[in-house]
């Protein structure tokens, strides 16, 4: 079985799992919390913190899941209700999240100072980046995609399908038409033609969703599609840059034809927080009109 066939089979199975979990709030939370755990463990293994393995797992996972708990405990407003509305409810994300993130700084640097291992300051920096990178990515998706007892199907499906569309069509457009390198120093396989193909098809995907879901209008869907394509590409390149700095090819080998979890969710981890900010801007604009 060649790599492309493995890639397609893995993508289809993965898509079925993630789409299937959207129709029940408990399966949704289970799948995406498990995803956050797997991503963070893979990330910590990726940065290889040598003698700091035990402390860094403990510190990193504790803060990561502290952040996830805040997102889970936060109120779920309807789309037309502002996400940040301190006058109407207490929002633990708004009040406690900055303190939890800042707590990671002294924890990471204390472990680095006390350890006899070499390059511990680099490990501290990588660990802090991981706290911002993974829990905030998955946490913002969970917060925006759920109400008190259900999943906002339009948002969850829309974001996931646009990320998948951009990734898939950038890959196939690059293979079929790619000539000019996009960012050769970071990812020699990515091309300008692949990027354009991903952007065009992601915007088309957004338009198709606008025909079935009217929570946001067609123009807002199209702008969201453009954001997903551009930010998703940046997320992909950022993870490639991380792997180059660590001199590795893939973040793992658990997903046949794809590599590791970070290789598949690098775009999602940047798209999710940007999408939440975008939705908040739309709410603010709607409130002014």
Image (cartoon, rainbow, N blue to C red):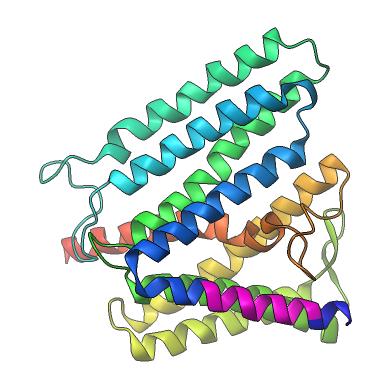
Image location of residue 172, percent across then percent down: 76, 82
* Residue 158 shows up from this direction: no
Residue at 45% over, 78% down: 222
Say if 189 sits above or below 101 in the image: below
Look at the image and say whether residue 8 sits in the magenta stretch.
yes
Say if 247 sits above or below 160 in the image: above
Which residue range is magenta in the image?
6-17
Residue at 72% over, 20% down: 121
Image location of residue 173, percent across then percent down: 76, 83
Look at the image and say whether residue 266 sits in the magenta stretch.
no
Residue at 53% over, 81% down: 203
Q: Nearer the viewer, residue 122 or 72?
A: 72
State the predominant SS element of the stretch in magenta. helix
Image location of residue 242, percent across then percent down: 76, 45
**Left of 202 or right of it: where is 272?**
left
* Residue 43 placement: quadrant: top right
Residue at 64% over, 15% down: 111
Specify the quadrant that holds the N terminus. Answer: bottom right
Image location of residue 177, percent across then percent down: 83, 85
């Amino acid at each position: 079985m060649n790599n492309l066939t493995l890639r397609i089979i893995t993508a289809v199975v993965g898509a079925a799992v993630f789409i299937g979990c959207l129709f029940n709030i408990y399966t949704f939370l289970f799948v995406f919390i498990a995803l956050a755990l797997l991503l963070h463990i893979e990330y910590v293994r990726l940065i290889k913190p040598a003698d700091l393995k035990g402390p860094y797992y403990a510190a990193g996972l504790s803060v990561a899941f502290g952040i996830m708990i805040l997102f889970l405990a936060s109120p779920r407003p309807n789309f037309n209700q502002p996400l940040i509305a301190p006058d109407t409810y207490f929002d633990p994300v708004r009040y406690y999240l900055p303190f939890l993130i800042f707590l990671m700084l002294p924890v990471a640097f204390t472990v680095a100072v006390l350890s006899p291992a070499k390059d511990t300051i680099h490990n501290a920096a990588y660990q802090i980046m991981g706290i911002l990178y993974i829990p905030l990515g998955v946490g913002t998706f969970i917060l925006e995609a759920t109400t008190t007892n259900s999943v906002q199907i339009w948002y969850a499906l829309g974001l996931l399908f646009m990320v998948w569309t951009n990734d898939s069509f950038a890959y196939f457009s690059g293979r079929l038409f790619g000539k000019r390198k996009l960012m050769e120093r970071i990812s020699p396989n990515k091309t300008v033609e692949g990027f354009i193909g991903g952007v065009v098809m992601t915007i088309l995907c957004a338009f198709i969703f606008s025909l079935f879901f009217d929570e946001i209008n067609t123009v807002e869907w199209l702008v969201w599609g453009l954001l997903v394509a551009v930010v998703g590409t940046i997320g992909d390149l950022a993870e490639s840059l991380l792997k180059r700095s660590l001199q590795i090819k893939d973040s793992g080998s658990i997903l046949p034809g794809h590599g590791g979890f970070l290789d598949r969710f690098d775009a999602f981890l940047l798209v999710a927080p940007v999408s939440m900010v975008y939705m908040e801007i739309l709410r603010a604009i709607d409130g002014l009109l």
